[in-house]
């Protein structure tokens, strides 16, 4: 008896091809991974060469030892001493050192790294805390902030023409220490935001830490920001 | 041509520890370690003299180290530091110091918010109060690439290296497709650190930042990949300003930070460059008094105005 088997339903071949493609892909992935891992193992750091040094190499070794000692001494001579501040913009921390001993660790806020453009005036501001070596140039009790143009632009307000409209007497807290170039260490009305990279470039501190720092540092105290 | 070598750095001891243990050092291995140590010290001295912060990628020591003026200000343990493009060190001949340790300068970091300036309208749309946390820029990425001025590709991965087939395959494909033009890059560095640390590193890195890297034992860098220490110009010490005699200041007029002309964010901040005129309320300062005045390649920082030579008297509200 002849019986005709029904043909495979449409779409089966496509599924089979897809399955084959997936299996092949997985196999390739597996092979690639094995290759990767074998490569890593094969190229690990070799053990130090145990061959004894020749006379010339021993001479080079002694010269290098002297050079290393000299370099270490030169680096050590550059290190700060006395009282200084270190500010970590990554973790938003400030440390006060006295005679190389840490006497205060404070949570601060540093620059957001954000940029603001003024499409009308064609100006651009980058709100970064500068990195490097600075000194305290001046100390101000009860500082009054004169709000710059960007402070109004950010608020969507028109930039005032008279000075009185720019004054913000409490915005900077009880004290400010000038780092130069318009950057300050100062207080904040927003202590809950301490620890965040949120400022326009200044370093903000909480009230208690600000007072401790203000009373400890003098004009000329170095500040190191990284 | 750079040899595409992939390395799992296995040396878990620092140069100092090895050298201290080998008081009577007498093998070529000891000499090789000392050469690397001296090459790194030469780099660090040049960077310390620049008076700018720097980051040392210590592959043999499995750590990252922030320094400033020779002071180690932070150390971050690194899980794995993978380097593609190394060459095997052959023979007893002394390799060039720049192939053992060298310096790189950061050009740009991935997704840097300063590359996409916001408009006042965008800020207004985001928050009514610019000081609240909602107005923050997006969280710093934990996995990011940085572009360098040298032919080196550097990537920070804020997740631990997984020992799975999938992770292996991902690493393989990343190795094959590392991003950027392969012909332009002699060296690929991938640094695995803890996630939080990676975000913190992202925040600290700004264009112009110096990085130093030391090669793992048994390997050397391609000669053209890194800068020699002599390429780094020494910086000037911050000037100590003598306070002016007179009555206590009543107010502080500041522009923080001051404006620069649009479109010059990448170039502003280099030595001697002046920004757009400062606003009326902020007089212009002696720029040479600060480290920013020192030669700083491609620092995208605005040059801010100078505070007055003596505190203002007529500003209290």
Image: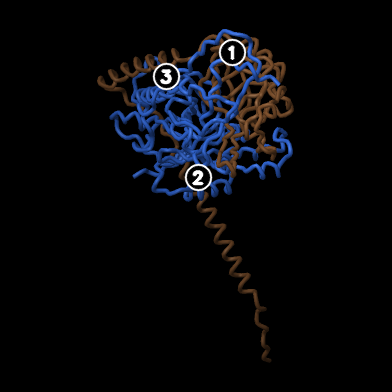
Q: In what element is the residue under mark 1? A: strand
Side of A213 where B52 appears, left or right: left
Residue B162 visible at all: no
Determine the chain carrying the residue at label 2.
A
Q: Which mark is residue A37?
A: 2
Q: Which mark is residue A97?
A: 1
Packing grade of label 3 (10 A; few <14, some 14-19, many >=20) is some
List the single residue furthest toward the bottom: A1
- Pointer 2 and pointer 3: residues touching (CB < 8 Å)? no
Q: In what element is the residue under mark 2? A: helix
Is the same chain shared between marks 1 and 2? yes
| Residue in the picture at 58% in, 66% down | A20
Determine the chain carrying the residue at label 1.
A
Q: Colour of chain B?
A: blue
| Residue in the picture at 62% in, 9% down | B247
Q: Position of residue B236 (x, y in %)?
A: 43, 20
Nearer the observer: mark 1 or 2; the answer is: 1
Report the Cα–Cα distance between label 2 and label 3: 32 Å
Q: Which residue is mark 3?
A: B19
């Amino acid at each position: 008896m002849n019986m005709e088997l029904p043909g495979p339903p449409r779409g089966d071949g496509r599924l089979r091809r897809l399955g084959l493609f997936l299996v092949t892909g997985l196999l390739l992935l597996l092979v690639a991974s094995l290759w990767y891992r074998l490569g890593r193992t094969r190229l690990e750091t070799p053990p130090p060469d145990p061959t004894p040094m020749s006379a010339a190499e021993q001479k080079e070794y002694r010269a290098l030892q002297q050079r290393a000692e000299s370099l270490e001494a030169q680096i050590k001579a550059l290190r700060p001493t006395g009282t200084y501040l270190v500010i970590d913009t990554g973790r938003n921390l400030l440390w006060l050192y006295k005679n190389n001993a840490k006497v205060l660790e404070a949570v601060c806020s540093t620059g957001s790294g954000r940029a603001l453009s003024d499409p009308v005036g064609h100006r651009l501001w980058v709100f970064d805390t500068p990195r490097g070596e600075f000194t305290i140039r001046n100390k101000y009790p009860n500082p009054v902030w004169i709000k710059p143009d960007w402070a109004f632009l950010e608020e969507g307000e028109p930039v005032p023409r008279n000075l009185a409209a720019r004054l913000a007497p409490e915005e900077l807290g009880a004290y400010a220490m000038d780092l130069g170039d318009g950057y300050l260490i100062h207080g904040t009305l927003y202590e809950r935001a301490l620890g965040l990279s949120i400022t326009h470039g200044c370093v903000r501190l909480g009230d208690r830490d600000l007072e401790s720092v203000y009373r400890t540092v003098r004009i000329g105290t170095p500040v190191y920001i990284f | 041509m750079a040899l595409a070598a992939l390395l799992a750095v296995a040396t878990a001891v620092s140069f100092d520890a090895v050298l201290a243990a080998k008081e009577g050092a007498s093998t070529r291995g000891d000499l090789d370690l000392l050469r690397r140590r001296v090459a790194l010290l030469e780099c660090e001295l040049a960077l310390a003299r620049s008076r700018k912060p720097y980051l040392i990628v210590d592959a043999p020591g499995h750590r990252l180290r922030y320094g400033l003026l020779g002071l180690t200000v932070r150390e971050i343990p690194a899980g794995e530091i993978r380097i593609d493009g190394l060459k095997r060190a052959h023979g007893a001949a002394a390799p060039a110091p720049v192939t053992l340790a060298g310096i790189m300068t950061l050009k740009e970091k991935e997704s840097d918010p300063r590359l996409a300036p916001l408009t006042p309208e965008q800020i207004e749309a985001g928050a009514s109060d610019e000081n609240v946390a909602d107005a923050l820029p997006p969280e710093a990425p934990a996995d990011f690439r940085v572009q360098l001025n040298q032919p080196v590709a550097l990537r920070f991965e804020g997740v631990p290296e997984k020992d799975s087939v999938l992770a292996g395959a991902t690493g393989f494909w990343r190795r094959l497709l590392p991003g950027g033009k392969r012909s332009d890059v002699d060296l690929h560095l991938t640094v695995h650190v803890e996630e939080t640390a990676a975000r913190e590193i992202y925040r600290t890195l700004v264009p112009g930042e110096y990085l130093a890297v030391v090669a793992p034992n048994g390997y050397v860098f391609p000669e053209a990949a890194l800068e020699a220490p002599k390429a780094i110009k020494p910086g000037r010490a911050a000037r100590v300003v003598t306070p002016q005699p007179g009555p206590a200041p009543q107010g502080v007029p500041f522009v923080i930070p001051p404006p620069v002309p649009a479109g010059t964010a990448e170039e502003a901040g280099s030595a001697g460059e002046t920004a757009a005129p400062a606003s009326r309320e902020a007089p212009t300062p002696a720029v040479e008094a600060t480290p920013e005045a020192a030669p700083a390649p491609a620092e995208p920082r605005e040059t801010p105005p100078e505070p007055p030579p003596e505190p203002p008297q007529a500003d209290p509200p």
